[in-house]
Image (spheres, rainbow, N blue to C red):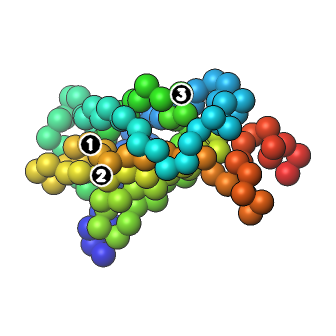
Amino acid sequence: MALARRVASTLVTALCAGVLLWASPGIADDIEQLRNNQPIKIRSESILFDRDKPRKTRFGKLEWLGTLRLTSPSPYFGGYSGLVLDNTGTALLAVSDNGVWLSAKLSYRGGRMEKLTDARIGALHGIDKKNLTRKNLRGL
């Protein structure tokens, strides 16, 4: 439980520190082409929280475990606004503003976030089994 709290606190810190996942323009028109539960290549680049103080890891009660800049050649990658980790801090699930979900394993080295592995992506579906997109959610 302590690890999950540390990871959750770190995730919030990392997001506030500038972990940016960019949305691709025009994705709502393409979402019907996305196969569900397909592998996706993601590049992870470690970023320092504070370049002037690279060894600083404590911020009040929060312990910084790392910040990752994530990129992918996939046009469906990006725009994630909902992120959740499991209790071990190693399984990630995210949803995007564009109607896409992402799952991945978060690996650590020396107690710091290192990279995402085993990433998979798919379209979010409504109860009617249709893909959820900005286009079909307008007016809700």
Residue 26, image x, y percentages: 67, 25
N-term-proximal mark, 1 vs 3: 3
Q: Which mark is residue 115?
A: 1
Number of the front mark, 3 or 2:
3
Q: Secondary structure at mark 3?
A: loop
Q: Earlier in the sequence, mark 1 or mark 2?
A: 2
Furthest residue to the bottom?
1
Q: Label 3 sits on what residue type?
A: Pro
SS at badge 2: strand
Q: Quick check: marks 1 and 3 in contact, CB under 8 Å?
A: no
Quadrant showing the N terminus: bottom left
Q: Is residue 63 left or right of residue 76?
A: left
The reply to whether dot 1 and dot 2 touch (C-beta < 8 Å) is yes
The image shows residue 79 at horizontal and vertical percentages of 56, 37
> Which of marks 2 and 3 precedes in the sequence?
3
Q: CA distance from mark 3 to mark 2?
A: 22 Å
Task: Name the side, left or right, on which 137 lies relative to 114.
Answer: right
Find disc 3 in the rendering and name its residue.
75
Which amino acid type is marked by label 2?
Leu
- 47 lies above or below 118: above
Q: Which of the labelled discs sits on residue 106, or is there none?
A: 2
Do labels 3 and 2 touch, CB within 8 Å? no
Q: Is residue 70 visible?
A: yes
Residue 47 position, x and y percent, is: 27, 33
Q: CA distance from mark 1 to mark 3?
A: 20 Å
User: Residue at 46% across / 55% down in the picture?
Assistant: 93
